[in-house]
Amino acid sequence: MLLASPAMLFVFVVFVIPFFTFAVYSVLTSELFSIGPPVTLDSYRHAIESDSVRTLAYNAGLIGAIVAFVTVAAALPIAYWLRFCAGRWRLPVLFLITSTVIASYLVRIYAWRSVLGTHGLANSALESLGLIDHPLNFLLFNRFAVGIALVHIFLPYVVLLLYASFGPMPSALLECAQDLGAGAFRRWTRVIIPLMAPPLLSSWMLVFVLSAGDYVTPQLLGGTTGVMIGVEVQNQFKSVGDYASGAAISFLMLGAFALTYALLRLTMHFAKVPQRIEWSS
């Protein structure tokens, strides 16, 4: 307990205290940049009944789910290649992946603004190839721009997570499946994906929560159609000064994330997916 006390204190200060503070804020009456009694649930009722909040929540769920699926689907073969096929290229590629994690979050977002902008790299390349006569304006400030930037941001993290999960898997297991007549497709569907289901679902949930709750990327790349619920929470706190509504929307988001996680766990349970794999030589 003594050794764990610094970490427990840190979690208490940065998570538990803000959590209960938001819980109190969400049931109080809010005025302009102030909060106080009486206790009420009007903020929750207004958030549930608001058309704009429902639209932003739908955007957040849709973009978060698509980004999570694309990120995990792209990261899985990369992690597999690093674990079983990379050979002497493993360390250089891991170094490149890790270096992208170190790069600034905002730098990567502005890089995509430069790539997808009216006079950006994508439009310039298409014009030079003669495929278009005028710049394509729909590449930026929409859901597509937000999604592709979020995939780029979270892909290195998921690759590293899945690579670590592949680590204990013995290569002899895949060789045995091949000896028993399983082709490449059958090895993936009957051996690799079932055994990797727990880390795959955990990675999906991680990317989904971080993507759906993000507010920086939608602000800089989303325009009018790519705005998500995190932007509304930020506006309620900083622009409108309605602390109760901002806290209520945050707790509704938290409830949606918890429900999604519970559904994933139930799916794993009824599909009889093992929660933990014990590898043996």
Image: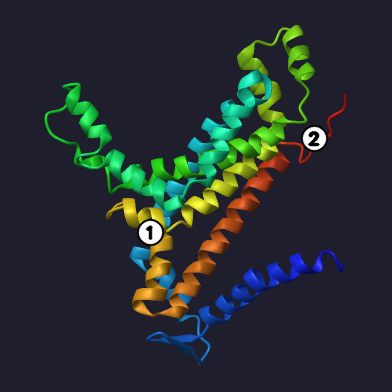
- Quadrant for the N terminus in the image: bottom right
Q: Nearer the viewer, residue 33 or 120?
A: 120
Name the residue: 62% across, 52% down. Answer: 261
Q: Is residue 241 left or right of residue 1?
A: left
- The outermost residue toward the bottom is 37
* Above-or-below relation of 43 to 174: below
Label 2 packing within 10 angstroms: few (<14), some (14-19), many (20+): few
Q: What percent of the width, then of the height, locates residue 157?
A: 58, 42
Residue 277 — which label?
2
| Mark toward the viewer: 1 or 2 | 2
Disc 1 is placed on an element classified as helix
Q: Kindly indicate the quadrant of the structure image that contains residue 173.
A: top right
Q: Nearer the viewer, residue 140 or 56?
A: 140
Name the residue: 53% across, 81% down. Answer: 25
Please, what is the three-letter code of the amino acid marked with disc 2? Ile
Q: CA distance from mark 1 to mark 2?
A: 39 Å
Q: Is residue 9 left or right of residue 38?
A: right
Label 1 packing within 10 angstroms: few (<14), some (14-19), many (20+): many
Q: Nearer the viewer, residue 237 or 89?
A: 89
Q: What percent of the width, then of the height, locates residue 78?
A: 57, 27
Q: Kindly indicate the quadrant of the structure image that contains residue 267.
A: top right
Q: Is residue 148 left or right of residue 196?
A: left
- The outermost residue toward the left is 133
Q: Which residue is under mark 1?
A: 56
